Image (cartoon, rainbow, N blue to C red):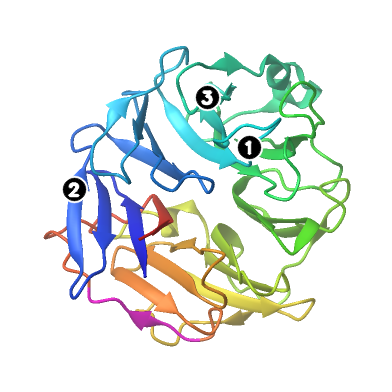
């Protein structure tokens, strides 16, 4: 069964199933912000922090060491692992920072180089994070598992850009594409599909990001944060949504919902088994290719599992530490047991 890795403001939490769930706490007082698992070697995990750099585990998350020597910024806002390239055993690790830069490691985090072409894109002059308009950051990195070297990078806020050669060259935001992507997704069964949950709505591309369609039919709340696609069906999509950032992240103001759609049908609310939207922060999602039809969700109320691709949900009886999820969840990942 799959273990779950959660990122909160206070710690990185790992829930491991056995006869009962066992929960571990890591990275306390280091302000963890993002996490990634190497699909080619699930014993290797990477965690980015706000001000404490990048950390790595080589034993499935039980022990952690700093791994960001060569990354010139300590604010790590996104991390992802793409497929191995050129006969490598380990996946290519990509790290995004604030201010917006992307670094790449081909040796599992030992050495890093900046992909400086990102900062030369014409749209970079317009990138700005509204709460702190003098800066911006890389919100999400999405490697395409079916095409080594193809990577989508979301800047908060301003653009969803891409590279097709591992960062040697970059393509700027496509006209009509999302401006404020919070989470992007690709799919093993649909190499040309790209999905974006953005502050400006839901977007899909069927040509690897050359063109985009904004599809918001059925969405009563259009500030999107989380996204998951059924591992068995690239047409089944789940998103988390709120009216705006003030209703998405902080429990006192939170009012967030989950929607689901199939192919080009309109979105429908998919809240069966989930807590009421009022008082609930936006859900983060995770899937694993070995669990077809299964989607995991986490928010300030708990963790949930759907076995029917997001149509219905069941709470997981995980003994999280008191108030561990109280301020919401920043990220969620599956870790094969």
Between disc 2 and disc 1, the foreground one is: 1
Mark 2 residue element: strand
Relative depth, front residue between 331 and 295: 295
Residue 314 on the magenta segment:
yes
Mark 3 vs 1, N-terminal side: 1
Residue 298 coordinates in the image, percent (x, y): 37, 64
Relative depth, front residue between 272 and 123: 272
Say whether residue 209 is left or right of residue 51. Answer: right
Tell me the distance, in whole angstroms, between the alpha carbons under discs 3 and 1: 10 Å
Do callouts 2 and 1 mark residues in contact (Cβ within 8 Å)? Answer: no
Read off the residue under disc 3. Answer: 107
Tell me the distance, in whole angstroms, between the alpha carbons under discs 3 and 2: 27 Å
Q: Residue at x 50, y 36 (%)?
A: 79
Q: Is residue 277 visible?
A: no
In the picture, which quadrant includes the N terminus?
A: bottom left
Between disc 3 and disc 2, the foreground one is: 3
* Local crowd size for mark 1, using a 10 Å CA cut-off: few (<14), some (14–19), many (≥20): many
**Residue span colored magenta:** 312-317
Among the 4 quarters of the image, the one containing residue 31? top left
* Local crowd size for mark 3, using a 10 Å CA cut-off: few (<14), some (14–19), many (≥20): some
Relative depth, front residue between 200 and 288: 288
Read off the residue under disc 2. Answer: 25
Read off the residue under disc 1. Answer: 84
Tell me the distance, in whole angstroms, between the alpha carbons under discs 2 and 1: 30 Å
Q: Residue at x 42, y 68 (%)?
A: 297
């Amino acid at each position: 069964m799959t273990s779950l890795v959660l990122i909160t403001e206070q710690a990185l939490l790992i829930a491991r199933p056995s006869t009962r769930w066992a929960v571990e706490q890591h990275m306390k007082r280091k302000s963890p912000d993002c996490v990634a698992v190497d699909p080619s070697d699930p014993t290797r995990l990477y965690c980015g922090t706000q001000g404490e750099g990048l950390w790595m585990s080589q034993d499935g998350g039980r022990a952690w060491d700093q791994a960001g020597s060569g990354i010139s910024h300590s604010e790590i806002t996104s991390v992802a692992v793409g497929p191995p390239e050129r006969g490598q055993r380990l996946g290519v690790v990509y790290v995004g920072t604030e201010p917006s830069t992307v670094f790449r490691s081909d040796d599992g985090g030992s050495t890093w180089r900046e992909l400086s072409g990102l900062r030369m894109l014409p749209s970079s002059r317009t990138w700005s994070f509204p709460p702190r308009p003098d800066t911006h950051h890389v919100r999400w990195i999405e490697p395409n598992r079916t095409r080594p070297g193809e990577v989508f990078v979301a800047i908060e806020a301003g653009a969803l850009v891409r590279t097709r050669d591992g960062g040697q060259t970059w393509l700027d935001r496509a006209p009509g594409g999302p401006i404020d992507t919070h989470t992007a997704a690709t799919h093993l069964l649909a190499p040309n599909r790209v999905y974006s949950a953005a502050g400006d709505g839901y977007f899909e591309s069927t040509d690897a990001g050359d063109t985009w369609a904004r599809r918001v039919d059925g969405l009563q709340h259009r500030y999107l944060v989380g996204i998951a696609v059924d591992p068995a069906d690239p047409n089944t999509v789940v998103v988390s949504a709120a009216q705006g950032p003030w209703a998405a992240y902080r429990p006192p103001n939170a009012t967030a919902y989950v929607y689901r759609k199939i192919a080009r049908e309109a979105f429908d609310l998919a809240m069966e088994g989930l807590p009421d939207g009022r008082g609930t922060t936006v859900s983060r999602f995770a899937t694993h290719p070995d669990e077809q039809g299964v989607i995991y969700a986490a928010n300030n109320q708990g963790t949930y599992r759907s076995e029917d691709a997001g149509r219905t949900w069941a709470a997981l009886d995980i003994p999280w530490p008191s108030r561990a999820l109280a301020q919401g969840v920043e990220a969620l990942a599956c870790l094969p047991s």
